Amino acid sequence: SAVISQKPSRDICQRGTSLTIQCQVDSQVTMMFWYRQQPGQSLTLIATANQGSEATYESGFVIDKFPISRPNLTFSTLTVSNMSPEDSSIYLCSVERRNGYTFGSGTRLTVV
Amino acid sequence: DAKTTQPPSMDCAEGRAANLPCNHSTISGNEYVYWYRQIHSQGPQYIIHGLKNNETNEMASLIITEDRKSSTLILPHATLRDTAVYYCIVRERSNDYKLSFGAGTTVTVRA
């Protein structure tokens, strides 16, 4: 399975600020996926990031709120912009491997 | 729309087999059944997947009914470290790259 390094592992942020989460994969991948897991809930796909093109966002998620960068085949960032307490969640990146998906350990974000 | 139905929770005894059911009555012919689990404070972990034949690996066995409308994940000898939320997901392997997570089954292994 791919090794995924996600930073930061956790953060506490003031409302109105932005946080950029980094995801580094140990091998080249075409697509990287960003998920959100709200407290006590299951995972929800935010967007799919392809290298060299705009990210594809799922219903309910917009680029202005969650801008994504994908500068190369091993790296992506997700920014949570103008944060409010409702953005407090775990954010996870994921890549597809031959037998399934591998997930990072997640970024636990608390907005105060 | 939810493609799978799982019980919200189940308990099992340490050392015994844990049988986790999943209903997927609307599964199409080219959709696979995937199982993942999420241990507290970690990202989901791939367990196993199958199309129509039963599958076994070092972690678990997957039994898919002949009509493919349901399946069972079997953890042969549950340990305390198997306590997690288990997700049953159906998806096409070739086209639909998205994983849609339902609520899953919270499995608690008790000593």
Image: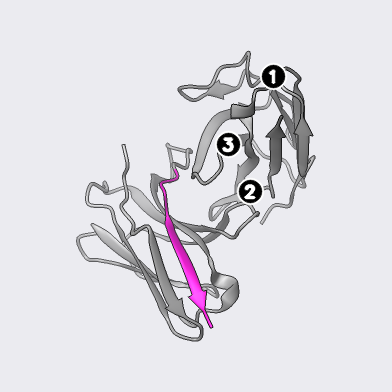
Task: Say which amino acid is labelled 1.
Answer: Ser
Local packing at callout 1 (Cα closer than 10 Å; few below 14, some 14-19, many 20+) is some
Q: Is residue B9 visible?
A: yes
Q: Residue furthest bottom?
A: B15
Is B31 within the magenta?
Answer: no
Same chain under badges 3 and 1? The reply is: yes
Q: Residue at 73% of width from left, 52% of height from top?
A: A3
Residue range in magenta is: B101-111
Describe the element under mark 3 as helix, strand or loop: strand
- The residue to which callout 1 is attached is A81
Q: Residue at 61% of width from left, 58% of height from top?
A: B40
- The residue to which callout 2 is attached is A103
Q: Does residue A73 appear to the left or right of A95 in the view shown?
A: right
Question: Can you tell which mark lies on residue A36?
Answer: 3
Occupied quadrant, residue A52 = top right
Task: Say which amino acid is labelled 3.
Answer: Arg
Q: Does residue A85 appear to the left or right of B12 in the view shown?
A: right
| Comparing labels 2 and 1, the label whose residue is closer to the camera | 1
Is B104 within the magenta?
Answer: yes
Q: The numbered mark 1 sits on a residue in which chain? A: A
Q: Pick the quarter of the image with the N terminus of chain B.
A: top left
Tell me where residue B75 appears, x and y as whole percent.
46, 75
Local packing at callout 2 (Cα closer than 10 Å; few below 14, some 14-19, many 20+) is many
Q: Pick the quarter of the image with the C terminus of chain B.
A: bottom right
Q: CA distance from mark 3 to mark 1?
A: 14 Å
Answer yes or no: do the residues labelled 3 and 1 have beta carbons within 8 Å?
Answer: no
Question: Can you tell which mark lies on residue B44?
Answer: none
Residue B16, compared with residue A71, is above or below; it is below
